[in-house]
C-alpha cells in the first residue's frame, strides 16, 4: 500500500470525541489550498455511519457552505433524525472556525429484495487504453506556476484515466458527455462502509468539469471561477473500489453562472453501482493584473 493510499484511509477513519461528535483531518487528499469537496462529503458520511451499525447508505444530499481550511481539523456533529423500521436518517454538520462548511443528510436502508433494472453501460474502451493521471499531466508541468507545481504533480491515492482528455490550457469546445476510469487498489479488503466513503470521495472528481466542456473551458484557465455548490449521490449495489469503475458524466444545462452535472458509476463488468448529481458555480471574472484592464 502506498503512503498516499494509507493517508486517505486514515483521513476517513475519523475520531470520536463524544456521542454523535467526531473530528476529521483537514489536510491531505486531492488539494492543499482548500479541502477537496469529496473529502468533506466522505468524512461526513463516515460520521453518519458511526451512528448506524446495521444498515447501508442508499442516498446522501449535501450543500457546500464555505471553503474548507486544510490547516485545521473538521468537526462533524451528527443528528439522529430518524430510526425507522426500514429506513434510518442522519443529518451531519461539518464545522470549522465555528461556522458550517457543509451540511449533509444521509438515508440508510435495510437489505431488501426487489425488481432489478438498469441502463446499459456505454461502450467505452477499457482503462488500459488511456494514460494515467501523472502521464497525462507531465506535458503541462512547465506551464504550471512554480508555487503550484509540487501540488500539481504530487502522488494521489485515486487512479484516474480520462477517456479522450482535452488540453488543459487551450481546450476546444466539446460535448458535455465524457468518461473516465478510476479505482483505488488499496480499497481491496476494506469494509462496505469504507468502500462507500471512498467512492463518495472520488465521486467529486471531474464532475464539475462536464459543464465547462461545451464552452471550451477548464479551471486551469484564467478568467474561470468554479466551485461545487451541492452534491447528491445514490448507492445502488455493493462496491469494490479496488477494481476499475467507469464514470459516465454529462451536463445537460448551464446558465445563470451555474452548471448542472450528472454521473453514473459502473463496474468494469457493466453493473451500475452509483449515481451522482451536482450543481456548480461557473462564473466568468477578470483576473487582477489582466492586461485588458487598461
Image: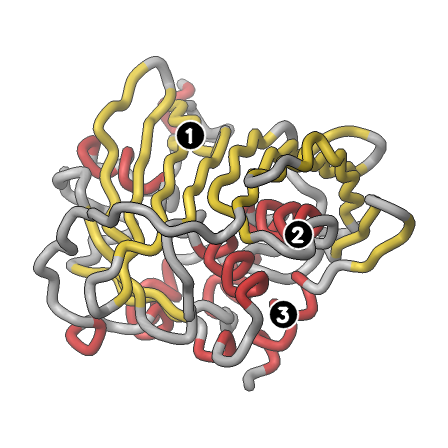
Instruction: Give x and y (percent) for residue 26.
Output: 72, 53
Instruction: Give x and y (percent) for residue 177.
Output: 17, 42
Q: Pointer 2 and pointer 1: residues touching (CB < 8 Å)?
A: no
* Placement of 220 over or under 286, stated as above or below: below
Residue 82 seen anywhere in this rendered image of the structure: yes
Q: CA distance from mark 1 to mark 3?
A: 27 Å
Earlier residue among tags 1 and 3: 3
- Residue 169 or residue 209, whichever sits in front: 209
* Placement of 158 over or under 56, stated as above or below: below
Question: Farthest bottom residue?
Answer: 1
Q: What residue is disc 2 on? A: 49
* Callout 3 crowding tier (Cα within 10 Å): few <14, some 14–19, many ≥20: some
Q: CA distance from mark 2 to mark 1?
A: 27 Å
Q: Is residue 218 left or right of residue 86?
A: left
* Quadrant housing residue 284: top left
Earlier residue among tags 2 and 3: 3
Residue 221 seen anywhere in this rendered image of the structure: no
Q: Pointer 2 and pointer 3: residues touching (CB < 8 Å)?
A: no
Q: What residue is disc 3 on? A: 9
Q: Which residue: 68% across, 37% down? A: 83
Question: Farthest left residue?
Answer: 123
Q: Quadrant of the N terminus?
A: bottom right
Q: Is residue 3 left or right of residue 269?
A: right
Q: Which residue: 42% across, 20% down? A: 293
Q: Which residue: 50% across, 29% down? A: 229
Instruction: Give x and y (percent) for residue 205.
Output: 41, 51
* Quadrant housing residue 279: top left
Q: What residue is disc 1 on? A: 280
Q: Which mark is residue 188?
A: none
Q: How is the image coloured?
A: secondary structure
Amino acid at each position: 500500500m502506498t503512503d498516499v493510499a494509507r493517508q486517505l484511509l486514515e483521513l476517513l477513519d475519523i475520531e470520536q470525541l463524544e456521542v454523535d461528535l467526531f473530528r476529521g483531518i483537514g489536510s491531505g487528499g486531492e488539494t492543499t489550498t482548500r479541502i477537496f469537496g469529496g473529502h468533506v462529503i466522505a468524512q461526513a458520511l463516515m460520521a453518519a455511519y458511526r451512528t448506524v451499525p446495521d444498515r447501508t447508505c442508499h442516498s446522501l444530499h449535501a450543500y457546500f457552505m464555505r471553503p474548507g481550511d486544510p490547516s485545521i481539523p473538521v468537526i462533524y456533529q451528527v443528528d439522529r433524525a430518524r430510526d425507522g423500521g426500514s429506513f434510518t436518517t442522519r443529518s451531519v454538520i461539518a464545522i470549522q472556525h465555528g461556522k458550517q462548511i457543509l451540511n449533509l443528510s444521509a438515508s440508510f436502508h435495510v437489505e431488501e429484495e426487489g425488481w432489478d433494472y438498469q441502463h446499459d453501460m456505454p461502450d467505452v474502451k477499457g482503462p488500459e487504453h488511456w494514460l494515467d493521471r501523472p502521464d497525462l499531466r507531465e506535458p503541462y508541468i512547465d506551464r504550471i506556476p512554480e508555487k503550484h507545481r509540487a501540488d500539481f504533480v504530487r502522488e494521489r491515492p485515486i487512479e484516474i484515466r480520462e477517456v479522450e482528455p482535452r488540453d488543459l490550457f487551450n481546450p476546444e469546445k466539446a460535448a458535455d458527455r465524457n468518461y473516465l476510469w478510476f479505482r483505488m487498489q488499496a480499497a481491496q479488503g476494506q469494509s462496505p462502509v469504507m468502500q462507500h466513503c471512498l467512492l463518495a470521495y472520488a465521486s467529486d472528481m471531474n464532475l464539475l468539469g462536464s459543464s465547462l466542456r461545451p464552452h471550451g473551458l477548464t479551471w486551469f484557465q484564467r478568467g474561470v471561477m468554479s466551485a461545487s455548490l451541492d452534491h447528491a449521490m445514490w448507492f445502488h449495489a455493493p462496491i469494490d473500489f479496488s477494481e476499475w469503475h467507469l464514470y459516465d458524466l454529462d451536463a445537460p444545462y448551464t446558465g445563470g453562472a451555474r452548471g448542472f452535472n450528472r454521473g453514473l458509476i459502473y463496474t468494469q463488468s457493466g453493473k451500475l453501482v452509483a449515481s451522482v448529481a451536482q450543481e456548480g458555480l461557473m462564473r466568468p471574472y477578470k483576473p487582477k493584473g489582466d492586461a485588458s484592464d487598461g
